[in-house]
Image: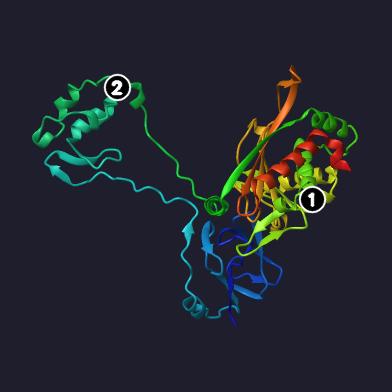
Amino acid sequence: MAVALKLPKMSDTMEEGVIVSWQVKVGDEIKSGDILAEVETDKATMDLENYEKGTVLHLNVEEGKAIAVDSIIAIVGKKGEDFSALLSATPKKAEAPTEAPAEKEIIPSTQPATPAAIETTVGNSDSRILASPLAKKMASDKGIDIAMVAGSGENGRIIKRDVESYSPAVMPASVSGTESFTTVPVSQMRKTIARRLSESKFTAPHFYLTMEIRMDNAIAARQEMNQFSEVKISMNDLVVKAAATALTRHPKVNSSWLGDTIRINNHIHVGVAMAVDEGLLVPVVKHANNKSLSQISTEVKAFSAKAKDKKLQPADWEGNTFTISNLGMFGIEEFTAIVNPPDACIMAVGASKETVLVENGEMKIGNVMKVTLSCDHRVVDGVVGSQFLLTFKELMENPVKILV
């Protein structure tokens, strides 16, 4: 008996997917465990595994097309079996093209408006230009835009003498050139980012706390660590470890708003925001407070490589209880981030920079870094967020405390 294969929900936030490529074709014999297709979800491009046995009778979605979760993507059964009832019983959901539709091209009319004149549409304008064939040819040969020529013939028709006498006006530099644009399709990832962050920004009442941290000790400690560590420790690894340690002392920051209840997480899973071409991915360092800096560094580097190759799996990005977004490597000194649900807080980390500091009335050269904690005010109050930042500051300014 023929079976309809439907698109499963391949991530917790997936609403539709794009069939990037079919790994089977009509007529193929397949079995459980075979890969049917590569599917672009809102988080990554993933292999779709088959759990049926039989012949591929029908592929219901073209490559490059989007289709909603639980919609039919293929039919499997016995060779030659009639499967039309399956398709008619469960109408296929509307498919959204992943490529923007081409703009309609305006084609000149081939019908003469008057003898020896044709009606031509110029550019994207709705206005009609009447010109004789000879005038058009002369204008083309001379490199003259026919739309810029004033016509003196019947009904304003452009004729030979108009082109011959045409003298282009001096145009400001700002209006020269050709207008153009490129329409880029919205990826599944970008759609989900837009939806979830919009929900977060306009649902959760955000407030922001910024603190400046002396980084001289952290810089020196990192340099010394890297003389012994088998993997290179980054400043971001220190930030992740310090934040995880601070969360153990301030569990309210490690919480989630659930509507009627607040969930205070006893485990600490730190999401690390990573930029990819389509948007932002947040793989999660689970139990970060219990891991060494070397373990954190190795894990984050592996996540980064998988993110670039679109190989992150659901287990990699699920379960965050707190998130860090670091733009310091891009020279950004200070910014605010939108809370990443279900977290109550996200910490934006800026660049460490050398500056002049005043201590005890004396000017000194030192390195500082600014961090901004975005808080969901339904869960975290100003004092709670400030206490967390004070602890984080203490740990970053005295890195040995992170290790004990």
**Residue drawn at point x = 19 percent, y = 26 percent:** 163
Residue 171 disc label: 2
Which image quarter holds the C terminus? top right
The percent position of residue 59, horizontal first and vertical second, equals 55, 68
For residue 43, what is the image quadrant?
bottom right
Q: Residues within 10 Å of mark 2 (few under 14, many from 20)?
A: few
Frontmost residue, 149 versus 175: 175
Outermost residue, left side: 154
Query: Going by the image, does 231 lie left or right of 384?
Result: right
Query: Going by the image, does 17 lie left or right of 146?
Result: right
Above or below for 403 versus 30: above
Outermost residue, right side: 228
Above or below for 216 versus 285: above
From this viewpoint, is residue 277 visible?
no
Above or below for 365 versus 331: above
Q: Give the amino acid type for the residue marked by disc 2 in the picture.
A: Met
Kindly state the secondary structure of the residue where label 2 is placed.
loop
Frontmost residue, 300 versus 258: 258
The percent position of residue 180, horizontal first and vertical second, equals 40, 36
Q: Distance between the residues labelled 2 and 1?
A: 67 Å
**Residue drawn at point x = 29 percent, y = 22 percent:** 171
Comparing labels 2 and 1, the label whose residue is closer to the camera? 1
Frontmost residue, 161 versus 223: 223
Outermost residue, top side: 362
For residue 28, what is the image quadrant?
bottom right
Kindly state the secondary structure of the residue where label 1 is placed.
helix
Residue 248 disc label: 1
